[in-house]
Image: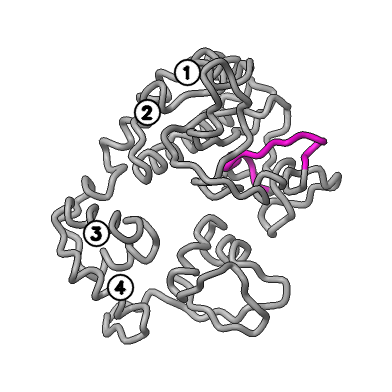
C-alpha cells in the first residue's frame, strides 16, 4: 500500500473507529494475501495494494470474520505510522493524530455479529489506550462521524449509522473501554504485585511493557524490580535460563514463510509476530528457509 511505503510516523494521541460501509463481514475482502486463516479473495481486491480501488487509503487494522467464521483483528500498519483513513476538516486531519481501524460491516441487522465485533473493537481500544496513554473519552477515542464534527475528518456517518441499531453509541463504547481498563486492562492493575520475576520477564518479551525507558518506568511504577526483571529477560533470550517451565518451542522456517504467517499459524494471531522477533533478537522481518526460530508456547 502506498501509505505504508510513504512511511510517515505519528505520535498517537487518539483512536478513530471506522466501519467499511459495505455488506461484507469477511476480513479477506480487505486483508491479503491469504495466510491460511483469512481465506482466498477470489477477486484479489484487498487493500494490500498500491491504491485500493484507485484510492489513497489505509487503516491500521481491520476487525471481521476469518474463513472459519471466527472474529479477529488484523493489524495492517504499525500503530505509529500515519494512516490515510479520515481525510481532513477545518481543524486539520486525524491522520496526524489518531490510530484507525475498520470494522467490517454486514447487513447491519445481525445482533450476534454486531455484539462480537463491538466486543473485539472495545478490547482493541483498551489495549491501544494502555499502550499509548490514550484516554477513552472524546476527542481522543472517537468515530469517523465525530471526527467530522470536531473538524478533523471528512463527512462520513460511520459508525453512528450502525451502533444505534443495536442500542449502542460511541458513549456506550467509550464506557465499555473504560470498564475494561478498570477491570484488568492495564498490567499495573492486574495482580501485578503477585507476579514472579520469571512471569514478568516473559510479559516483557511479549511486548506487554513497552521498550527502553518506557518499560523501565512502567515496571517501576507498578512496584516491580526493573533490574531483576531485565536480568531475567536477558537470561531467557541468551538461552541460559534455568527456569523449570520452558515456554519455547523450536520452528524451522519453510519456503514462503513470513513472521506474520508463522505467528498466525503457531501462536493464533499474526499480530504476535513481534514476540518472535524479540525472542530471536531479530532486527528486521526478513527470514529464510531453514532458519531455526524459537517460538513462545
Mark number displayed over residue 16: none
Residue that sits furthest to the right in the current view = 43
Dot 3 or dot 2, earlier in sequence: 2
- Number of numbered callouts drawn: 4
Which color mode does the image show? one colour
Mark number displayed over residue 216: 3
Which range of residues does the magenta coloring cover? 51-66
Q: What residue lies at 48% left-to-right and 78% top-to-bottom?
A: 294
Q: Residues within 10 Å of mark 2 (few under 14, many from 20)?
A: some
Instruction: Verify whether residue 183 appears in magenta.
Output: no
Dot 3 or dot 4, earlier in sequence: 3
Instruction: Measuring from the top left, give residue 258's x and y in whole percent.
Output: 64, 67
Dot 1 or dot 2, earlier in sequence: 1
Q: Provide the residue designation for mark 2.
A: 176
Instruction: Measuring from the top left, give residue 166's x and y in whole percent.
Output: 53, 17
Q: Residues within 10 Å of mark 4 (few under 14, many from 20)?
A: many
**In the depicted structure, whether residue 183 falls above or below residue 228:** above
Q: What residue lies at 59% left-to-right and 67% top-to-bottom?
A: 285
Label 1–label 2 contact, CB within 8 A? no
**In the depicted structure, whether residue 70 falls above or below residue 156:** below
Q: Nearer the viewer, mark 3 or mark 4?
A: 3
Q: Secondary structure at mark 1?
A: loop
Instruction: Measuring from the top left, give residue 115's x and y in whole percent.
Output: 51, 29
Q: Provide the residue designation for mark 1.
A: 168
Amino acid at each position: 500500500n502506498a501509505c505504508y511505503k510513504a512511511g510517515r510516523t505519528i505520535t498517537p494521541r487518539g483512536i478513530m473507529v471506522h466501519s467499511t460501509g459495505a455488506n461484507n463481514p469477511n476480513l479477506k475482502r480487505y486483508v491479503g494475501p491469504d495466510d491460511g486463516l483469512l481465506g482466498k479473495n477470489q477477486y484479489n481486491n484487498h487493500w494490500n495494494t498500491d491504491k485500493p480501488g484507485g484510492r489513497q487509503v489505509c487503516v491500521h487494522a481491520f476487525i471481521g470474520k476469518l474463513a472459519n467464521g471466527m472474529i479477529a483483528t488484523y493489524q495492517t500498519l504499525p500503530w505509529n505510522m500515519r494512516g490515510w483513513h479520515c481525510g481532513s476538516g477545518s481543524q486539520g486531519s486525524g491522520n496526524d493524530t489518531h490510530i484507525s481501524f475498520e470494522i467490517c460491516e454486514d447487513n447491519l441487522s445481525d445482533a450476534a455479529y454486531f455484539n462480537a465485533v463491538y466486543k473485539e473493537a472495545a478490547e482493541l481500544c483498551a489495549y491501544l489506550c494502555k499502550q499509548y496513554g490514550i484516554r477513552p473519552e472524546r476527542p481522543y477515542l472517537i468515530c469517523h462521524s465525530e471526527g467530522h464534527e470536531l473538524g478533523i475528518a471528512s463527512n462520513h456517518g460511520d459508525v453512528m449509522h450502525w451502533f444505534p441499531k443495536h442500542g449502542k453509541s460511541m458513549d456506550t463504547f467509550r464506557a465499555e473501554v473504560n470498564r475494561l481498563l478498570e477491570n484488568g486492562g492495564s498490567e499495573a492493575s492486574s495482580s501485578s504485585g503477585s507476579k514472579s520475576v520469571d512471569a514478568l520477564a516473559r510479559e516483557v518479551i511479549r511486548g506487554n511493557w513497552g521498550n527502553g525507558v518506557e518499560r523501565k518506568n512502567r515496571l517501576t511504577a507498578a512496584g516491580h524490580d526493573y533490574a531483576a526483571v531485565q536480568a531475567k529477560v536477558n537470561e531467557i533470550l541468551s538461552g541460559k535460563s534455568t527456569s523449570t517451565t520452558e515456554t519455547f518451542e523450536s520452528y524451522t522456517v519453510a519456503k514462503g514463510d513470513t513472521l506474520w504467517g508463522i505467528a498466525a499459524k503457531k501462536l493464533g494471531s499474526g499480530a504476535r509476530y513481534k514476540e518472535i522477533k524479540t525472542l530471536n533478537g531479530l532486527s528486521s522481518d526478513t527470514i529464510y528457509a531453514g532458519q531455526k526460530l524459537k517460538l513462545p508456547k
